Image: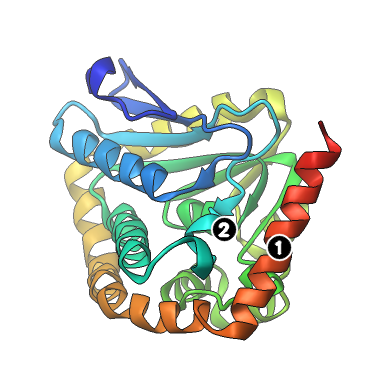
């Protein structure tokens, strides 16, 4: 991918080993706006279309220890957006995740620090997750007054088992790295200084086998779920918008925005 074509907020480095390192750097916390989801989609497009690229590592380039703080609240708070924009936001984000889950590429999430909600969804859609010793991970939307998306919760269930995923989602739990490892939510926990090396080692292990067998097996295991996910999001946004536009959810998200605004003000 030519540097001139890399979307704002990203750095893409194609390595001689046949893989791309995608660094997300949208300060301060890699909030997943429509623009960031579009950027992730265009990068996945470019990597899939390049026969020389066999895998991707997703990592954070932020100053803080945060992989991603999740979806941008401004994309969910009804008074600041519209049904039309929300539709594009929801369909774009979920089509990306569904594609990432079944891509021919070998994928690794190198998780440094906090990884709630949308950040967790990206990592769950990857083949392997390596996390630093400090941080947390999970689908905690319930704590914000909104529901966990159906296929996000379903994906967590496919990774760690339905009952455990249900418990985590309903209680908005964000396990620390060691508990996440014991649950199977991540595959490896390492010191921060070793994160990139561990991610590269994991990807190299996957790439040691011929792509054709891995890609075919991955497609067999995941393409049906990915296809259902991609189709469902085309109508899911309608139910989502109805909920977001309700007085109760608008009030809940308004309080979240006020809390976030207060934190920013306190740091000035």
Query: In the rendered view, does 35 fall on the left or right side of 31?
Result: left
Q: Nearer the viewer, residue 177 or 148?
A: 148
Q: Which residue is mark 1?
A: 256
Tag 1 and tag 2, C-beta contact below 8 Å = yes
- At which x and y percent is residue 188? 63, 45
- At which x and y percent is residue 57? 43, 34
Q: Is residue 7 visible?
A: yes
Classify mark 2: residues with Cα within 10 Å, few (<14), some (14-19) or many (20+). some
> Residue lying furthest right in this view?
266
- At which x and y percent is residue 40? 35, 42
Q: Which residue is mark 2?
A: 73
- Looking at the image, which residue is at 54% across and 84% down? 246
- Looking at the image, which residue is at 61% across and 29% down? 62
Disc nearer the start of the sequence (1/2)? 2
- Looking at the image, which residue is at 37% across and 43% down? 35
Q: Nearer the viewer, residue 232 or 20?
A: 232
> Residue lying furthest front in this view?
79
């Amino acid at each position: 991918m030519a540097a001139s074509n890399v979307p704002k907020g990203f750095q893409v480095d194609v390595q001689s080993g046949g893989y791309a390192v995608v660094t997300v750097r949208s300060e301060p916390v890699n909030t997943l706006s429509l623009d960031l989801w579009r950027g992730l989609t265009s990068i996945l497009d470019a990597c899939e279309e390049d026969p020389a690229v066999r895998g991707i590592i997703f990592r954070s380039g932020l100053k803080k220890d945060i992989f991603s703080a999740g979806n941008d609240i401004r994309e969910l708070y009804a008074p600041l957006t519209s049904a039309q924009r929300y539709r594009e936001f929801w369909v774009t984000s979920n089509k990306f995740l569904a594609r990432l889950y079944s891509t021919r590429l070998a994928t690794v999430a190198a998780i440094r620090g906090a990884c709630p909600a949308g950040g967790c969804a990206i990592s769950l859609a990857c083949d392997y997750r390596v996390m630093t010793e400090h941080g947390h991970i999970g689908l905690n939307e319930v704590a914000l007054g909104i529901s966990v998306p159906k296929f996000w919760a379903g994906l967590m269930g496919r990774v760690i088992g339905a009952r455990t995923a249900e418990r985590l989602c309903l209680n908005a739990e964000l396990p620390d790295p060691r508990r996440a490892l014991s649950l199977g939510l991540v595959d490896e926990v390492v010191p921060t200084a070793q994160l990139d090396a561990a991610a590269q080692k994991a990807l190299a292990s996957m790439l040691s086998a011929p792509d054709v067998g891995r890609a075919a097996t991955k497609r067999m295991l995941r393409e049906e779920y990915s296809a259902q996910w991609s189709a469902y999001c085309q109508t899911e946004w309608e139910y989502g918008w109805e909920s977001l536009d309700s007085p109760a959810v608008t009030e809940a998200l308004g309080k979240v925005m006020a809390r976030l605004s207060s934190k920013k003000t306190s740091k000035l």
